Image (cartoon, helix red, strand yellow):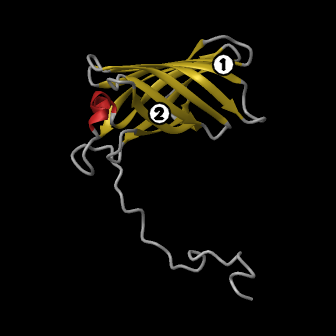
Amino acid sequence: MSTEENPLQPPPWLNAPPVDPYPYEETHDLRQGPDLHADLLDLLPFIGVWRGRGRGGYPTIEDFDYAQEIRISHDGRPFLHYESRAWILDEEGKPVRPGGREVGWWRPAGKDKDEIEAILTTPTGIMELYLGKIEANPPRIEMVTDFVARTSTAKEVTAGHRLYGIVEGALLYAQDMAAMGEGLTPHLSARLIRVGG
C-alpha cells in the first residue's frame, strides 16, 4: 500500500534512538550556569535554596509546626522555577510526616517588570494563578489569586494571598487562604534561611 493510499504512516520519531539528557542547565546558584535574564533582576534576591521552620493553621484544622525547603531557580529565560516541599514536625522538632508540596513558575510582567504572574500547582489537585507586585527595595512580593482551578476530589480552595520578603538575609512569607467556606484567613507563615545559591 502506498503513502497516497495510507496517509497514516508511522511518524519518523517512532523508532528513533534515545536522545541525550536535557542539555540546558537550570540553577539556583548565580555563580554558575546561564546568565540571569535582565527581566529577573528585581527577583534576584529570591533565587536560591531556602530551608526553615513555620507555623500553620486554619479554622477547620488544628495548628501545626512544619519545616520547609523552597528552591527558586532559573535557566536564563525570563521566569523562575519555584518548588516547595514541607514536612510536619512534632513538639520536639522531629519530622512526623510529609506535608504540602507545590511547583510552579514566577514571571515578571508589566511595562517595568514590577508586576508578577505566578502559577502554582499541588499534587492534591489545586492550581492557582496569582497576580501581584514586585518591590525591589526592600525585596518584597505580594500577590493574590486571579483564578483557582481544582479537580473534583481536591479541597475546596477559592482564593489566596501571599507575601514574600527578604528580611536580614532570610526569606519570610505569609500565606492566607479562602477554603472550606472560610474567607481569606491566615494559613501559613515561615522564616527560611538560604542554604544554597
Q: Amino acid at mark 2?
A: Gln
SS under mark 2: strand
| Of residues 124 and 115, the one drawn nearer to the viewer in this rendering | 115
Q: Is residue 28 above or below residue 33?
A: above
Residue at the bottom extreme, as displayed: 1
For mark 1, what is the residue? 62
**Camera-side mark, 2 or 1:** 2
SS under mark 1: strand
Q: Is residue 9 above or below residue 129?
A: below
Task: Please tell me how crowded label 1 is: few (under 14), some (14-19), or many (20+) other residues with Cα within 10 Å.
Answer: few
Q: Is residue 63 left or right of residue 21?
A: right
| Of residues 100 and 145, the one drawn nearer to the viewer in this rendering | 145
Residue at the front extreme, as displayed: 4
Q: Are marks 2 and 1 in contact (CB under 8 Å)?
A: no
Of labels 2 and 1, earlier in sequence is 1
Q: Is residue 183 left or right of residue 139?
A: right
Q: Amino acid at mark 1?
A: Glu
Task: Indicate the quadrant where residue 136 lies.
Answer: top left
For mark 2, what is the residue? 68
